[in-house]
Amino acid sequence: MEITALGQQLKQGNVAPVYLVEGDEVYLVDETRKLLRQLLSSEESDMNFGQYDMETTPLAVALDDAASAPFFGDRRLIFIKQPVFLTSDAKKAKVKHNIDGFLKYLANPLPSTVLVIFAPYPKLDERKKVTKFLKKTATVIDAKKRTPEQAQREVQRAFQQANVKLAPDALTSLMQRTAGDLTAMMAAVPILLTYALQAQTITAEAVAALVPQNLEENVFSLVDAVLAQQVTKALTIYDELLLQKEEPLKINAILVGQFRLLLQIKILQKSGYSQGNLAQVLKIHPYRIKLALRQTKRFSRASLREAYLGLTEIEAQLKSSQQSPRLLFQLFLLKFTDRAHQLGLTQNQA
């Protein structure tokens, strides 16, 4: 079930006894939580709302609460978070859970209780009896990560509902600055709608002025500058990230991860993998694959390897020395540029 359908059903008074919110798209999870919390008034919430984290609390405690009658109200609302017992990582859990008791409750849930299980995982373990039975008995809410195309439609719908025009290039700019992430895009919507109070149409210039690039998008630009051997531009972007209080180790780790991804794509492409296959095999958001493919077309495998090895050296130095992160990055750029000229890596050569 989609979020919109859930909202319509709740308005009509059609409330299920058990919901499974499956997926880790933060915006969709938060919207679902808001809709369900509206089932109780603020006064009722004090007595009839419970929330339990399965990484620290036994499932039996939440079930006891779910099996209790409501106090001075029509229903109880119980949220279960981090249900690790539905995943393949259950053996690593520090808390022992009463799965048999959970199965019994699902078979005969209390009508006056709304039990909501939030499973913020990319995938549940479908082989488990508890997972199969929960999906069979609960109303499943789809909160999985959206593709860039789905995210784009969701954002367009939000502007249409507000009767605000969004220029085509503005939507493209918003996609680029948020890496096609629905949660990041929807966070920008209220800001852009406020701007629209004084303008008839939201332009790409407005998006550029009001929506900051996320760290990954800045790093994407930084990767381009490094591979193009644009030392001044690369240092400027790096300095901007430092001014934004980003940790040098974090910046370097994302850079290493991006170059690793580019190398993996370069190798897999040579083996015949398509864009769709790459997203599945590497378990990476399709939009990131799309952007990475643009870079791999322009740069050689040898240049990607040189940059990757140089950045792993910086990582070791950042962890073991007190040298200036900016100086280390500058030395890396100069060394990489010099090495690239020696090996003739300015073109996309194998």
Image: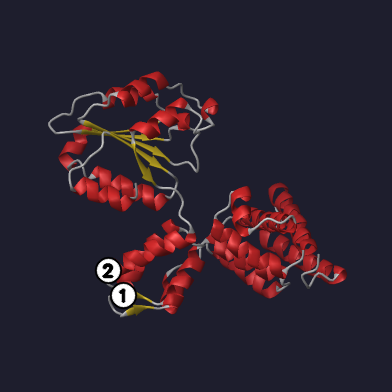
Give yes or no for contact between labels 1 and 2 (Cβ–Cβ under 8 Å): yes
Element on which disc 2 rests: loop
Whether residue 286 is visible: yes
Whether residue 188 is visible: no
Amino acid type of the residue tagged 2 in the rendering: Ala
Amino acid type of the residue tagged 1 in the rendering: Ala
| Quadrant of residue 343 within the rendered picture | bottom right
What residue is at 34 percent from the left and 23 percent from the top?
Answer: 61
Nearest the viewer among 15 and 213 is 15
Front position among marks 1 and 2: 2
Q: Position of residue 270 (x, y in %)?
A: 75, 58
What residue is at 45 percent from the left and 69 percent from the top?
Answer: 174
* 54 to 164, vertically: above or below: above
Q: Position of residue 150 (x, y in %)?
A: 43, 59
The residue where tag 2 is placed is 162
Judged left or right of residue 321, residue 221 is left
What residue is at 58 percent from the left and 52 percent from the top?
Answer: 284
Crowding near pointer 2: few (<14 within 10 Å), some, many (20+)? few
**Mark pair 1, 2: CA separation:** 10 Å
Crowding near pointer 1: few (<14 within 10 Å), some, many (20+)? some
| Quadrant of residue 197 within the rendered picture | bottom left
Q: Position of residue 98 (x, y in %)?
A: 40, 20
Judged left or right of residue 56, residue 215 is right
Q: Position of residue 199 (x, y in %)?
A: 31, 80
The residue where tag 1 is placed is 196
Checking the image for residue 132, the label placed there is none
Element on which disc 1 rests: helix
